[in-house]
Amino acid sequence: MSDLDSLLAKTSRTFALSIPPLPEPTRREVTIAYLLFRIADTFEDAAHWPEAQRIAALEAFCGLLASESRTEAARLAVEWTAAGASPHAGYAELIREVPFVLDAFRRLRPEAVAPIRTHVERSARGMAGVVTRSASGRLSLTSIDDLKAYCYVVAGIVGEMLTELFLLGRDNLVPVADALRARAATFGEALQLVNILKDSAQDAAEGRDYLSAAAPRAEVFALARADLESAMAYILTLQQAKAPRGILEFTALPVRLAWATLERVERSGPGAKLTRLEVAAIVAELRMSLDLGRAAVDFAAGSRQ
């Protein structure tokens, strides 16, 4: 049986780096929540399946979130695995381990189970709506507003869920709860926009045209920068309210990586990535900043994050 950290490492390079510093029980809750969102993402991305099959899988997954039946989870996991839900080895293993992940989810504290279930289900149902718009397995977004709506469904909702988990049991964050909630969706959307810009060529080859020909690429880059600035304000709000260091590291690392990636893609084009050494340097720089009591992110540095 796979363990949660192993599944995380096999399904997300960035989150495998940023989740471990989180304090418990938030670390376990965020790990499980990420895996649940990734299960839904796998069905949404399964362009090799007919649309009806992808929608049915998303609906069935929503049913499992509300169910206590391990038997049904095991049956569906076998069915989805046999149907080849994903060619990606890590995602395929995650689908096999759906019953295990759901077992871990149900053992979380009740006050965490509720927001995770609500937000994962909202995202999964939104993804089903996106799939209904596909034509012959191909998704094409038609405008900037379309792109923003898509990013909200797959990532903005994640930011909203994370915020609710951060607030659980932390009285010092209550005074800034409204400020955090106001920027929670943009925090998630910013990271998704950068990934879309980075992976646009591969996505298009796999039947996902997220960047409309009607939306100038420069406008999408400008939107990504604006969203990243909002994400930085979100992080600084957490820091000023004395959020635990692990939460600051968890939120700031993806944003610093996204700034650096955005700059690389803008200069070198889709597919450009940071090297492992560059990622390690950004991790080290962030940890030094936090050690010295400096800001987790720096508006003045902008894309030099």
Image (cartoon, rainbow, N blue to C red):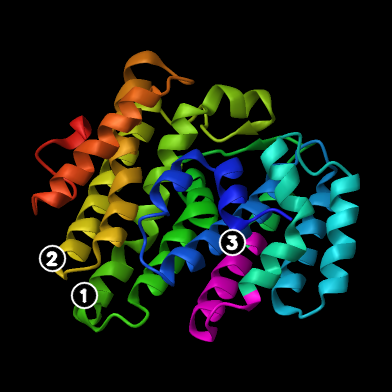
| Rendered position, 294 above or below 86 | below
Residue 6 point in image, percent of width and height: 60, 48
Query: Any mark on residue 56, and which?
Result: none
Q: Residue at x 86, y 61 (%)?
A: 76
Q: Residue furthest top?
A: 268
Circle nearer the N terminus (2, 3): 3
Say whether residue 124 is magenta: yes
- Decide: marks 2, 3 in contact (CB < 8 A)? no
Q: CA distance from mark 3 to mark 1?
A: 25 Å
Question: Is residue 274 in view from this perspective?
Answer: no
Residue bearing the label numbered 3: 123
- Decide: marks 1, 2 in contact (CB < 8 A)? yes
Circle nearer the N terminus (3, 1): 3
Residue bearing the label numbered 1: 176
Q: CA distance from mark 2 to mark 3?
A: 30 Å
Say whether residue 130 is magenta: no
**Disc 2 packing (10 Å; few <14; some 14–19; many ≥20):** few
Q: CA distance from mark 1 to mark 2?
A: 9 Å
Circle nearer the N terminus (1, 2): 1
What SS does tag 1 mark?
Answer: helix
Residue 235 point in image, percent of width and height: 24, 57
Q: How many marks?
A: 3
Residue bearing the label numbered 2: 240
Q: Nearer the viewer, mark 2 or mark 3?
A: 2
Q: Residue at x 76, y 79 (%)?
A: 67
Q: Which residues are magenta?
A: 106-125
